[in-house]
Amino acid sequence: MTVPVFLADGLADHTGPELVLDGPEGRHAASVRRLRAGERIDLTDGAGTVAECVVREALKDALRLDVLGRYEVPPPEPRLVVVQGLPKGDRGELAVEMMTEAGVDVIVPWAAARSVTQWKGDRAAKSLAKWRSTAREAGKQARRFHLPEVAEPVSTAGVEALLGGAALALVLHEEAADPLSGVALPAGGDIVVVVGPEGGVSDAELAAFRAAKAVPVLLGPTVLRTSTAGVAAAAVLMARTGRW
């Protein structure tokens, strides 16, 4: 059975032979997962620090742990950033979940011109919190020791800035001539991929992204939903860069 992963803040600063997993993570481990003495778990701070532990004692809402070993997982290169046009309904959380499982490093919500959903006021804060919670839980399930960053939402101008600073900037577009599978890839830096919303990337947006040195690319012969295009592109890039 796969060793479960739990998040622990401040793990990099703790050097002792024992740990206590408490708070929401400890409560989940003790009360929901019902872990007991002798079982193995891994703790991570989500930034690359890992502590391999065995449960010494299960309390009502916490675990006392013996630390078996510690190590650091270096951040992956090149870094994959996906700009996700805001989709309808709960498809945003689905996209975040799948991209987290695939290994995407940064997910950037984008208020595209053709986005039916708009994040404004309280809705913006709640929606962003849902995306971040989804990424956190999916990262634990996938045993990721570097959790993805879900950035603050950006406008089209913000996307242009991201593309301008990338080692490679790509826009998924159904009318592109070049396939994603054939684009030359950098060894390091950021690969930024733009995924449009249900209505796609507008002509004005595409022109602006081209001016920011982005390359339109074709993902395949079929048209994917916005919620699945990002993870499909990530799979291609993960395999081609050797991260998979």
Image (cartoon, grey):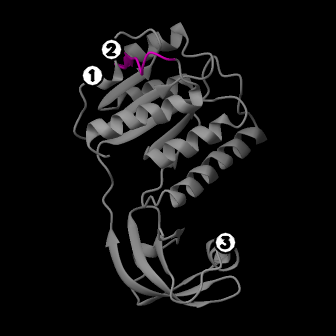
Contact (Cβ within 8 Å) of mark 1 with mark 2: yes
Q: Which residue is mark 3?
A: 24
Residue at image x 27%, y 23%?
Answer: 183
Above or below for 18 versus 201: below
Residue 92 on image: x %, y %: 63, 37
Q: Quadrant of residue 199?
A: top right
Does dot 1 land on a helix, a strand or a loop? helix
Q: Which residues are magenta?
A: 212-222
Is residue 215 on the magenta stretch?
yes
Above or below for 58 versus 224: below
Residue at image x 62%, y 75%?
Answer: 29
Does dot 2 land on a helix, a strand or a loop? loop
Left or right of residue 12, residue 20 in this image? right
| Nearest the eye: 139 or 32 | 32
Q: Residue furthest right?
A: 122
Left or right of residue 182, residue 111 in this image? right
- Which label's residue is closer to the chain start, 2 or 3? 3
Above or below for 206 versus 97: above
> Please, what is the dominant secondary structure of the magenta stretch?
loop
Amino acid type, callout 2: Asp
- Which label's residue is closer to the chain start, 1 or 3? 3
Left or right of residue 38, residue 111 in this image? right
Q: Which residue is mark 1?
A: 182
